[in-house]
Image: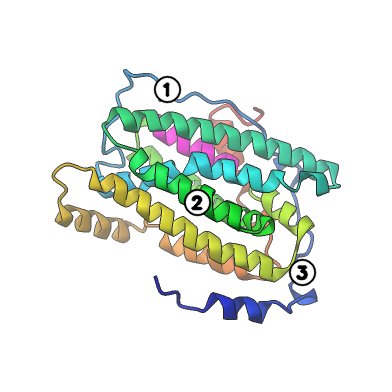
Amino acid sequence: MKLPVDPRALFDSLRDLRSRTRTPPATVDSGRDPIVRRMDFGFTNPELDFPKHWMGGSVLGTAITNGMNLLFPEGERFFVRSVRYYMDELEDPQLRAQVQRFFGQEGQHARSHQQYMEVLTRQGYDLDAFLKPYKRVAFGIIEPAAPKVLCLSITAALEHFTATFAEAALSERFFDELAPPAMAELLLWHAAEEIEHKDVAFEVLRQIDDRYSVRIAGLVAACILLWAFWTAATLSLLAQEKELDPKRLVQEWLSAVRSGRTGGTKMRRAFLSYLEPGFHPANTGNDELALAYLEEIGRRAG
């Protein structure tokens, strides 16, 4: 894949930025501390009635969303490892407490998405066709070779992207319309908690190494890795569809583009906002969306 810019030239040009690009302290809402919630969506029940093409009947939409689901369990564990490595260097007791809650939330997310994989297995998908190479390449080769601070920076960037997806899911509520109740509940709960802890990894990065070049290196790496693995996961699932109709996939994609639900515009905005020297996720102004949903399901307090 040919990149539109030369990463080495980009990083060289950013290396000497110092005072102008230091991230200022965030305006943090102290009422938005992460809360660990243990949820049960019934995915381990073998009698759960769950349609194979659950995303509004779309083969492509289901494969894309299922592909993201395949990334979550190991991805969440990577986030925890990346932040935990620096725990002993964090002096702020409030941040340390938030980090511990971040670990708890990510652990619950990994658990719930792992349970959803049981549904996919019962539907006949061979998940190891993607999961084995994914784990080997991402966490057996790339993670050990990458500097620890880059892993932390990648985590901070990916947390920004997941919080952006979360804001869209909670503001537009399209999962209520397109997905079975269990899946809508999983994704909206996950979305709300992503917003609850949206700034934790970023704040750890800011405390450990607040160079702009480090932040942007993580952003670029996160974009490449996310889209590469997400695409691979989606294609692996599509390859297992019986009687796959390419024309149907094109029609479903065009329909999604017309509906504005592809997420491309939102992700471009998320990318560009992260490039701003003074960016901090605590100031993105989507906290009320998360709180309103958690209030709706009676889990705001835990």
Which type of secondary structure does the marked residue at label 1 adopt?
loop
Of residues 225 and 26, which is closer to you in this image? 225
**Residue 22 image label:** 3
Q: Residue sitting at 52 percent across and 48 percent down?
A: 140
Where 78 sits versus 2, above or below? above
**Residue 138 image label:** 2
Q: CA distance from mark 2 to mark 3?
A: 30 Å
Residue 99 quadrant? top right
Residue bearing the label numbered 1: 42
The type of residue carrying mark 1 is Gly
Q: CA distance from mark 3 to mark 1?
A: 46 Å
Q: Residue sitting at 26 percent across and 47 percent down?
A: 238
The type of residue carrying mark 3 is Arg
Query: Comparing marks 2 and 1, which lies closer to the viewer?
Result: 2
Q: Residues within 10 Å of mark 3 (few under 14, many from 20)?
A: some
Is 61 left or right of 202, judged from the image as shown?
Answer: left
* Residue stretch in magenta: 182-195
Please state, as top left, top right, bottom left or bottom right, where the N terminus lies in the image: bottom left
Is 142 left or right of 130, judged from the image as shown?
Answer: right
Please state, as top left, top right, bottom left or bottom right, where the C terminus lies in the image: top right
- Horizontal and vertical percent position of residue 178: 33, 41
- Horizontal and vertical percent position of residue 272: 56, 69
Of residues 39 and 169, which is closer to you in this image? 39
Where 214 sits versus 140, above or below? below
Name the main secondary structure of what is drawn in magenta: helix
